[in-house]
Image (cartoon, helix red, strand yellow):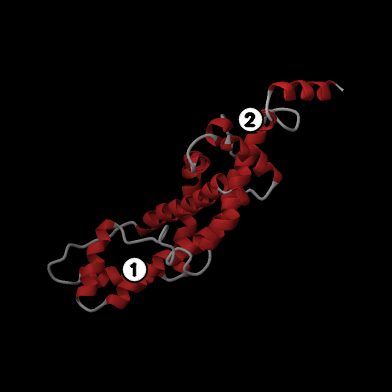
Amino acid sequence: MKKIILFIVLCQFLGCAELQQVVNQIPQGGGTLGNNEIALGLREALDMGIQKQVGKLTQQDGFYQNELVKILLPEELQKVDKTLRDIGLSNLADEGLKILNRAAEDAVKEATPIFVDAVKGITFTDAKQILMGPDNAATQYLEQTTQTQLYDAFHPVIEQSFTKVGADQIWNNLIHRYNSLPFTNSVNPDLTDYVTQEALQGVYTMIAVEEQQIRNQVSSRTTALLKRVFALQDQ
């Protein structure tokens, strides 16, 4: 009865449009969202990034044909690539580049559960601030809080992947051919470290893609929790 009386009183002072704005601003579902529920929403968004976007990286050419994350040669090896192409060994150079990406694809496939566990364990000390931050704020937070742990987990997987996909043999052959050329300086970069860093960055990049979609496209909020949480940033 009190609510009806209040509604009638408001109608006397406000037009329909103004009244609708007031109603829209009233917290729904018994109050505003707390830090814990917002944190659950952020974790769910990151989980969706892993499921929908990171999964693409595990497919053949998931890195190699994705310009957002394709692993190129480190700076010290770009001269190797150019020299090999200049002397007619483009196929060998292409194979060397592709094999780096193959190793990353294989490693992400093996290490995806590590990301899932990391997201479950992440603690958002100020979830609302992250929610109201830039389009990749949750992904940035994930990167800051998990990068060291994930690097330690990824590195041995990359190392094994190099052997599994034959990267070690191909690159040993490629670098040997380059080092045997006259008037060149020998190179011996740590490709395992380089590809590990690039693979990690590729994963974070793809998670950020999904986070951006959830923030900017209401249709991407496919659960009730995502709708409630990310509606706060729309206001």
Q: Residues within 10 Å of mark 1 (few under 14, many from 20)?
A: many
Whether pointer 1 and pointer 2 mark residues with C-beta atoms closer than 8 Å, the reply is no
Q: Amino acid at mark 2?
A: Asn
Residue 228 locus on image (x, y percent) = 67, 39
Residue 162 visible in image: no
**In-image side of 19 versus 216 (left or right):** right
Image coordinates for residue 38, horizontal then vertical, percent: 63, 35
The residue depicted at 46 percent of the width and 68 percent of the height is: 61
Of the numbered discs 1 and 2, the one sitting upstream in the chain is: 2
What amino acid is found at the position of numbered circle 1 in the picture?
Answer: Trp
**For the residues marked 1 and 2, what is the alpha-carbon distance in whole angstroms?**
49 Å
For residue 77, above or below residue 1: below
Where's residue 161, x and y in %? 47, 64
Hey, which quadrant is residue 99 in on the image? bottom left
Q: Which residue is identified by label 1?
A: 171
Pick the quarter of the image with the C terminus: top right
Res. 124 mark:
none
Left or right, 183 with respect to 189, comes to: left
- In the rendered image, the quadrant that contains the N terminus is top right
Q: Residue at x 20, y 77 (%)?
A: 87
Residue drawn where x is 71% and y is 44% of the image? 224
Q: Position of residue 199 (x, y in %)?
A: 44, 56
Which mark, residue 35?
2
* Residue at the farthest right position: 1
Q: 20 or 149, which lies in front? A: 20
Residue 147 appearing in the image: yes
Which mark is in front, 1 or 2? 2
Q: Secondary structure at mark 2?
A: helix
Q: Is the residue 63 above or below the residue 150 in the image?
A: below
